[in-house]
Image: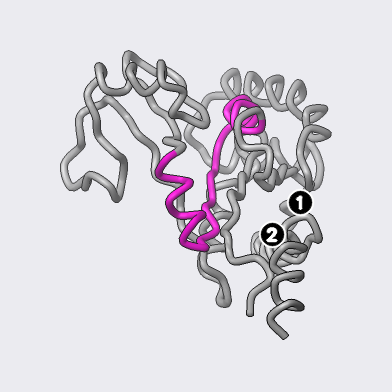
Amino acid sequence: MKLNERGLLVVLSGPSGVGKGTVRKALFELEGHDLVYSISMTTRQPREGEVDGEDYYFVSKQEFEQRIKDDQFLEYAEFVGNYYGTPRDKVDEQIELGKEVVLEIEIQGALQVRERAKDGVFIFIAPPTKEALFRRLLRRGTEDPKTIQKRMDKAESEFPLAHKYDYIVVNDEVTNAADRILAIIRAEHAKTERSIYKYKEMLEVE
């Protein structure tokens, strides 16, 4: 019998360029887990090949704004005239099924989620050094030096926010970072506060 049959909300966050997406993909490639990726809801039109319920949940602006009024998002933001958000009900459905719902998100969004999902597991992905982060941004080759410096300045202001997270995982090597995150998820399931009631039930049965 599993001590904790509910799933977890696992929030991966960190400064831009730290490799959140790469670590998340490596995490999903590991064996021995029940991870699902949190699908965002948006008011933008689907692009060619995108599937509703797989890439995004596509809804009207009216429906999205009604959901905002009804406090149905863990976090949301408006970008270039369209809304994007994490629907609370969809996350809860997966957690009740025992899935680990992984949300990969920027820091400000993660702090919004922290306010609404107190039992989530919040993991700050950090670079091994500031210089390593700078090199990663340079290697992307997609931005000019001025934009890269803006990202570095933003990261500088975000590093101190790591204390608001439950764990810090240094992305020194992608597979190592993914292994550490999976170990954290397993440890969280064994926490007394998550498993004590099931443990007492198990003792009564026996």
Residue at 46%, 46% in the rendered image: 91
Q: Is residue 61 above or below residue 20?
A: above
Sooner in the amino-acid sequence: mark 1 or mark 2: 1
* Of the pair 181 and 151, the residue shown nearer to us: 181
Q: Nearer the viewer, residue 144 or 36?
A: 36
SS at badge 2: helix
Q: Residue at x 72, y 42 (%)?
A: 124
Q: Which corner quadrant of the image does residue 203 belong to?
A: bottom right
Residue 182 in the figure: left or right of residue 190: left
Q: Which mark is residue 169?
A: 1
Q: CA distance from mark 1 to mark 2?
A: 7 Å
Answer few, some or many: residues within 10 Å of disc 1's Cα (few below 14, many 20 plus, some between 14 and 19).
some
| Residue that extends furthest to the front in the rendered view of this protein | 204
Vertical position of residue 70 compared to residue 185: above or below: above
Instruction: Give the magenta-colored segment's residue range.
Output: 89-114
Q: Nearer the viewer, residue 17 or 91?
A: 91
Report the quarter where the N terminus lies.
bottom right
Q: Position of residue 56 (x, y in %)?
A: 31, 41
Residue 24 horizontal/vertical position (percent) = 55, 54
